[in-house]
Image: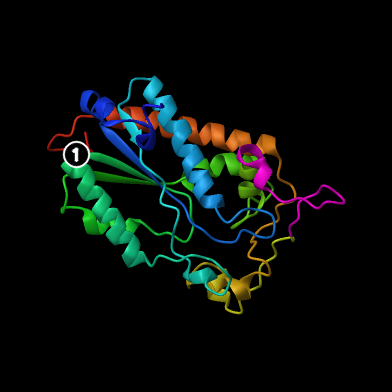
Amino acid sequence: MRPWVLSEVNYGYVKEHPYEVAVLPLGATEPHNLHLPYGTDTFEATELGLRACEQAHERGARVVLLPTIPLGTETNLAAFPLALNLNPSTLLAVIRDVVRSLELSGIRKLLLLNSHGGNDFKPVLRELTGTTTVHLFLCDWFRGLTADVQQRLFREPGDHAGALETAFGLACFPGLVARDAATGGLRADAGSMARNRFDAVRRGWVALSRPWHLLTTNTGAGNPHEATAAQGEEVVRIASERLADFLVELADSPVDERFPFE
C-alpha cells in the first residue's frame, strides 16, 4: 500500500491519517501520431502525480493522489477514430462533483494536474471560486512548469506527440511506444502542421479551435524523432520535484482569511 495513493489505501488508514491536499490528475484518450498510445496524456498525468505525491509524502506532507480522469475535451480531434470526448461543460460538472466530495471529507486544497492541451481549466477555477471551501490550484505541467527544461533539452518540443511527449513515453512507458520492425526507429511521421492562411492567426493575434484532421496528417504536431529516454527522465524528474516542493508548501500553509496570500 502506498499511503499517498487513494485507490490503494483503506478506510482504516484514512480514518487515522486525514489528508490536507488532494491531487487530481487529468488526462485524455486520443491518438498520438502513429507511435504513442491513446492513453499518453493519462499515463503522463498519473506518473507525475505518483512521483510528486510520493516525494511530498516522504517530506511529511499529508497529500493524496486521486484516480486519474482519463477523458478530456477532444472536439479538435473529433474526425479521428476513438478520440473520446468530454465537453468542457461536462468536465466542469465532473470536477464540481469531485470538489464537493473533497469538501465533505474536510479537504480544503486541491491541485488539478492537467496533461492534455485540449483541456482548459482556468474557467473551471473561476466558476467554482466562491462556491466551495476547497481552494483550487491548476498545473498544466507541459507549459510553465517545464518550459525552461524543454528549451534546454529539445530543439523543438512539439505541440502534440512531438519530441517532448515521445521522450516522456520512452522514459516511462517504453513498451507502448511503437517502433518499426525493420529499422527499430519510431513508427511515426514527421509531425508537420499545415500553415494557416491568416497572418493574424500565425502571429498569435487571433485564436481559433483547430480542426486537427486539417492541421496534421496522423495527429502528430511536432517531430518526435530527436526524442530520447534520457530527455524524458530529465523532464519527469524536474517536473515531479517542482510539484513536490509546491505540495509540501501547500500542505504546510494554514487556510486562514487571507489564504493563499500573505
- Residue at 55% over, 31% down: 237
Tell me the residue that label 1 is attached to.
Answer: 105
**Image quadrant assignment for residue 236:** top right
Quadrant placement of the N terminus: top left
Is residue 134 visible in the rendered structure shown here? no
Bounds of the magenta segment: 170-188
Q: Is residue 105 left or right of residue 164?
A: left
Q: Is residue 187 magenta?
A: yes
- Residue at 74% over, 60% down: 190
Which amino acid type is shown beneath numbered disc 1?
Ser
Q: Where residue 167 sits: x, y (%)?
A: 65, 43
Name above or below for residue 220 compared with residue 63. below
Q: Where residue 58 sits: x, y (%)?
A: 40, 20
Q: Is residue 197 left or right of residue 50?
A: right
Q: Secondary structure at mark 1?
A: loop
Query: 178 and 234: which one is in front?
Result: 178
Query: 74 and 191: which one is in front?
Result: 74
Q: Is residue 192 left or right of residue 141?
A: right
